[in-house]
Amino acid sequence: MQSNTDSPFASGGTPVVPDDGTVQMFTEEAEPGTSELSAGQRTVPAGSTLNESVWQTLKRDLLQIALNLRIVLVPVSKQTTAVRALREWDLWGPMIFSISLALLLSHQSDSPAKAFSIVFCVLTVGAAVLTLNVILLGGKIVFLQACSLLGYCTFPLLVAAMLTFYQSMKVVKLLVMLLGVAWASWAAVPFVSASVSPKRKMLAVYPLMMMYLFLSWVALTG
Amino acid sequence: MTSKGDEINVNLMDMQEGPSSSVMEDPFAQLGDLDEGGWGSMDPGLDAAGASVPEESPFVSLDQGAGQMGPGPVPLPDLSAATTTTTTTTAAGADPFASSNDVEVNLLMDSAPGGGSGDDGNKAENKGSDDKAKVTWNPLVFLKNRLEPYFDVDTDDIVQRTLQAIVKGYKGKFTEFTADKPDLYGPFWIATTLIVVSSASGSFAQYLSGVSKNDMDKVTASAFFFYGYVTLLPLAIWGLLIYHKKPMRLLNIVDVYGYAMSVFIPTAILCTVPNTIMRWSLILLAAAVSGLSIVMNVKQNFMEALQGKGALYLSGIAAIHLGLAIGLKFYFFLY
């Protein structure tokens, strides 16, 4: 988990070339699909994924997404979350959640295209900007891994938006969205605040809360 | 006493290599020397970093800057010598606290950070000749290396700077307050907060008065207003000041604008009350407080450049600020 370079982007300058010929950047600790994780997880032999069926590939990735969701959102203990923080990160999950949430929130809006683009941009660019914020404040995290974690943490908002899609009473909508914000913050805030020094904790956490509240406002009014 | 001075030298140099037999005596001996002569009795060739510094080093920075004793506070000689010789981001030997009248020195300071809005050619040059020798082609690492000095703030710093800009803005001392560490965190996140708060309050105010219009338009329009205001107007003022040969660091101007805009955050929240008089008075009060802060903090350079006509520029700045506030009121809180 601990990288031996200071760079949060973990490229190290020398790309690793695994057996199947692809070149991976950001290879420090997280090589999706080729990890040596504990037994009971699926292990993928590097280099032989070319011959498997499409469904098998998709199934592996979907299982990975579900696993990451479980790790991020239902941590066994606070320690586990802060330390392990998504060893096998991927960006499929965050992409699916961003697009789904943007679609949902734009559906109930007067100007769907604008709403979609705003929500999608806030989710993707916002994750990148928040991660950059933590890095610039002195946090030692890996960039894409943290983007992935923040993307997974928006899943509760997606659940809340789905639950309140047909709800017309604003108060109920507000309450459910706030519950979703609380769950997402419970997952994301410990990671972010543990990455920076204690004197800067608020500086790192505040933009995160602002993003979640903004998204719940969009869900509320649309 | 010379032998004790030698002992002190040797032990301080050797401290990393493990305890020596005479360590027990040395802390007290050092204190004894201090009692006798203060700083003057210590070897002037030794400074905090352990690097060798020429004999007259405590006074070098003042001599070089003797012709340009700015209105800022004069720093302690030995501390500034120790820090400025080992700092790579400030110009060599420059007094960090003076609002310098020297065009050359300030332009050097300006070209290094650029406030994130420097041109690419500048950045490419600096990348190759960076003192820290961190040449990188990875855009993210490059961003981190360039921007990290401007995010070196704690929560307490941000709060203090906001208070300094709003409550004590009329004194015009904001630039001196943040002289050594201007930051980019404040302006960026205050502008972003303003976008979120003003679009939410604006649509809530509309909801309260029963009108239902496009809320998403408000988000994009407020992003355009606030990000544009905090970046373009400081850029214009910076250009003007360079033209009139009294340059000010761009980052400082961005800071002044960014922290002054923070007064609009509570204003926007309070303006959801559907009372017209209250809204207008809140907006005008916020415009007055922030406008005063901005004008007072850029006033000095303008007044030094053009004695009487500087007031013309300042009133222009204030008028634009008032225009922004009125435009915000009409756009977000029309109903």
Image (cartoon, rainbow, N blue to C red):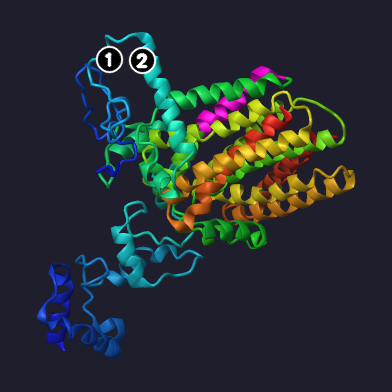
The first of marks 2 and 1 along the sequence is 1
Question: Which residue occupies 27% across, 11% down?
Answer: A50
Which amino acid type is shown beneath numbered disc 2? Thr
The boundaries of the magenta stretch are A111-126
Q: Secondary structure at mark 2?
A: helix
What residue do we see at 83% from left, 50% from top?
B281
Q: Nearer the viewer, residue A72 or B293?
A: A72
On the image, numbered disc 2 is attached to which residue? A57
Task: Label the magenta part by its dominant secondary structure.
Answer: helix
Residue B103: tell me if it is visible: no
Which corner quadrant of the image does residue B166 belong to? bottom right
- The C terminus of chain B appears in which quarter of the rendering? top right
Q: Amino acid at mark 1?
A: Thr
Q: Is residue B284 above or below residue A180?
A: below
**Residue B156 sits above or below residue B334 on the image:** below
Q: Is residue A136 above or below residue A36?
A: below
Which residue is painted at 64% across and 36% down in the image?
A: A214
Q: Secondary structure at mark 1?
A: loop
- Quadrant into which the N terminus of chain B falls: bottom left
Where residue B63 appears, as percent x and y from the top left, is 34, 67
Task: Report if the CB atoms under discs 2 and 1 are less than 8 Å apart.
Answer: yes
Q: Decide which of A192, B211 is in the foreground and name it.
A: A192
How crowded pointer 1 is (Cα within 10 Å; few <14, some 14-19, many 20+) is rated as some
> How many numbered circles are shown?
2
Image position, residue B36 (x, y; %): 27, 91
Mark carried by residue A206? none
- Residue on which the image places disc 1: A49
Please say whether residue A194 is one of the residues in the magenta stretch.
no
Pointer 2 chain? A
